[in-house]
Image: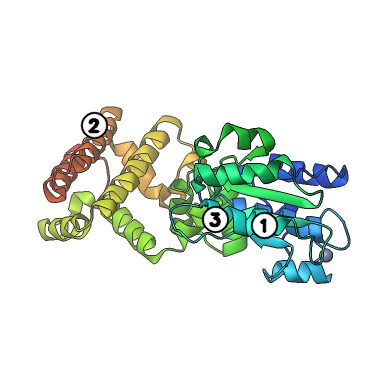
Amino acid sequence: MDSFEDIIGQDEIADYFRRTISRQKVSHALILNGEQHTGKGYMAKIYAATLQCEKGGLKPCGECHSCKMAASGNHPDIITVTHENQNSIGVDDIRQKINDDIILKPYYSPRKIYIVPEASIMTEEAQNALLKTLEEPPAYALIILLVDNKERMLPTILSRCVTLNVRPVAQESIREYLKARKSIRGREADVAVAFARGSIGRAEMLASSEEYIALMNDITNLLSHIRDMSISEELDFIKKISDNKETAVNYLDVMEAWYRDILVYKSVEKPGMLMFLNEQTQIARAARDAGYMEISSVLDAIEAARDKLNANVAAPPVFELLLDTMRDKAVTNSL
Ligand SMILES: [Zn+2]
């Protein structure tokens, strides 16, 4: 069963959890604040399971009845608050699932813990309803709000909760996690880490998305031998990426990361700093062959292409021009 030791890159939060348990100062209301897919729900569940464990230690024992119920997601006193409407949590959700329920004593454990995912989509009315409970929570209650947009929370709610901010996780830690826990390595790991924006959940999602992996393979192949590409290969490629604007923009992100790597390698020659760790040979060769001016003009061209796509210019001419620029600047070398 996972415990605080399994929380990666969020030491402050894990320490807070441990401290509140060892000092017996568990708050009645917590906010876990951070972007989507940053493990807020995961951390909340570990905290809840630890608090409910019958052994009362700093980690869930995994053997007691409470731990078994927590692990299976069926603990009667660890309640995940769901909502009917996809885009908002309404006042009825809060009244029925928290306010009316919290007054009933815990069923099995000493505490009753509510986890509210997506709490920032609570309507103002819902937040005001919740406020009533937060003003006088029963001694056994703990409410954990998972929030990805703190701006949408009423100041009165914020002032009654302890807020814990999720931090971006270091790239190296994400890479280690993917390798050790998910056996994801190589190019897939590189790209997932590069585009994870410090989020383990996002890295994992990217690395296990077949669509994303296919996209990465396409693009690294293209960038590795752009000089030798035939007209028909180029047209095929352009056709493929032009089908959908979102994909086209993703391609630009990857291209940008690739050329940034070339630039980094040229300036410092430290392979450890590269996003595309596994394409080191290609990157090194390109960095050797191209001047700073050429690399930065390709980066400018990528930026200009992005602006055009955002302004709804059709993708094919945008990519045609971009690929021409890349080839002219000969920033990449052939395989
Ligand atoms: Zn236990």
- Is residue 198 visible in the rendered image? The answer is no
The amino acid on which the numbered mark 3 sits, given as a three-letter code, is Asp
- Which residue position is annotated with label 3? 92
Residue picked out by circle 2: 297
* 25 vs 287, nearest the viewer: 25
Q: Which residue is mark 1?
A: 100
Residue nearest the observer in this picture, 287 or 167:
167
Callout 1: SS? helix
- Mark 2 and mark 1 in contact (Cβ < 8 Å)? no
Front-most of residues 145 and 217: 145
**Left or right: where 227 falls relative to 292:** left
For marks 1 and 2, give the CA distance: 62 Å
Q: What is the secondary structure assignment of the residue under circle 2?
A: helix
* Disc 3, SS: helix
Which comes sooner in the sequence, label 3 or label 1? 3
Ligand 1 near label 3 (Cβ, under 8 Å)?
A: no
Q: In the rendering, at what x and y percent does residue 168 appear?
A: 56, 41
Residue type, numbered disc 2: Ser
Question: Position of 267 compared to 83: left or right?
Answer: left
Relative to 297, does residue 4 appear above or below in the rendering?
Answer: below
Q: Quick check: can you spot residue 221? A: yes
Nearest to N terminus: mark 3 or mark 2: 3
Q: Do tag 3 and tag 2 residues touch (Cβ < 8 Å)?
A: no
Q: Quadrant of the C terminus?
A: bottom left
Q: Nearer the viewer, mark 1 or mark 2?
A: 1
